[in-house]
Amino acid sequence: MTPSRLAFAAILGKDLRAELRTLQSLPAMALFAITTFVIFRFGLDRTSLSGSLAAGVLWVTVLFAAILGINRLFVSERAEGGFADLGVAATGTLISSMAVNSRARDLLAPLVLLPLVVPLSIAATGAIEPLLALGGPGYHRFGTWLAVLGLYDLIFLLVGYAVFDFLLED
Amino acid sequence: MTEPAVAVAALRRDFDERPALDGVGFELAAGESLVVLGPNGAGKTTLLRILATLLRPSGGEVRVLGAQLPGEAWKARGRIGFLGHEPLLYKDLSGRENLRFHARLYGRRGAAAEGRIERLLASVGMERRADQHVAELSAGMRQRLAICRCVLHEPELLLLDEPDSNLDAEGRELARELIGPGEGRTRILVTHDPERALPEADQVLRLGAGGRVAVA
């Protein structure tokens, strides 16, 4: 395993171990996801969803639940003074490391992150829509959307690599 | 002529226009110890954080282990051991888990890494408490673990910010084996205890108000 992969595995393992031991984020994320589904159930007045609507509901829920976890992860990292090399996802990592260095840390991550992940959620919804289609899954333009997702992640990995030094400074 | 391990010239660091360091310069050869003295707010910790690549200088020249900072910081980072005010330990993990995590960050794992972790824990008298969560340990015990973390990857340069803080007499003696002078260690030591530090210093840097060199 290369040193960067070993470091990535170490950080992932450390975060999972700490979270499973303390359960600081998972219950809040699960509760949030359940609440969102309940709100959608009554808001849309539907008992079943398919296609683009189902994909949209799924990704909105995942996105907002992930923001809870990402913020928690970085505030904890900052508090213990151990900001390390890699995070969980390129986009969230970059924005959250900006946010924890800001006085308005609780507000900045959602405000900056949400507009930036709009293209990501459009591509993710586009990719998953045919999979949730009524009458069985399809793979229409699945590869194209996946490529868009990959490209967007790559851009943020490169931007993160370029500016990480600045963001980690006091 | 051998290149110095650390070379600093006309170093300046401002925080919102306020100078924390101004015109600091010194050269430190490999294997030497530099002791940094000065009152609170003189910029001692700022100097160490710049050398540890955690802060960017506002002006001047800084070379650490042959790397020009901040541009070549990546060349020096893995070769520096930094012991700051914070122990940089995760409170929800045990001491042993913390050291294992840091070893992996430096690309070390397997029997060799485990062996080194056990030797370090034994050398600071923490082998029996190493499976306790860091949150349950006293400040002195955390400092002992932080010293293990600092030297775990066998760094070429030690940057030590008041390493004796929170340590009892026994802890200070044990820590000396790992981070004290000798064995060719290159060290920059910030301390408020000149009586203890000066006898082992090859050079002394005294910082005054506004981060200016008071007496070189």
Image (cartoon, rainbow, N blue to C red):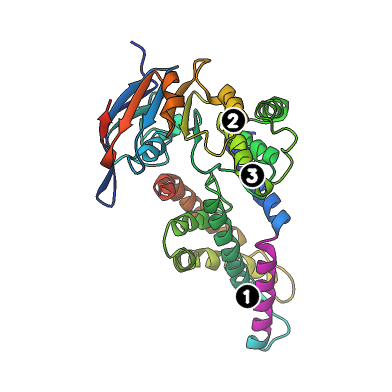
Q: Which residue is mark 1?
A: A57
How many labels were placed on the picture?
3
Give the chain of mark 2: B
Q: Where is residue A97 shown, x and y percent of the image?
A: 48, 54
Q: Amino acid at mark 2?
A: Ala
**Whether marks 2 and 3 lie on the same chain:** yes
Mark whose residue sits in front, 2 or 3: 2
| Residue at screen point 60% across, 74% down | A56
Q: Where is residue B97 shown, x and y percent of the image?
A: 69, 40
- Disc 2 crowd rating (10 Å Cα; few below 14, some 14-19, many 20+) is few
Q: Amino acid at mark 3?
A: Ser
> Label 2 to label 3, Cα distance in Å?
15 Å
What are the residue bounds of the magenta stretch? A23-41
> Label 1 to label 2, Cα distance in Å?
61 Å
Dots 1, 2 in contact, CB < 8 A: no
Q: Where is residue B117 shown, x and y percent of the image?
A: 68, 30
Under circle 1, the secondary element is helix
Q: Which residue is mark 3?
A: B138
Q: Amino acid at mark 1?
A: Val
| B159 in the magenta segment | no
Nearer the observer, A161 or B75: B75
Kindly indicate the quadrant of the structure image that contains residue B12: top left
Kindly indicate the quadrant of the structure image that contains residue A51: bottom right
In this picture, is A115 found above or below B41?
A: below
Q: Which residue is mark 2?
A: B169
Give the chain of mark 1: A
| Residue at screen point 45% across, 68% down | A111
In this picture, is B154 found above or below B163?
A: above
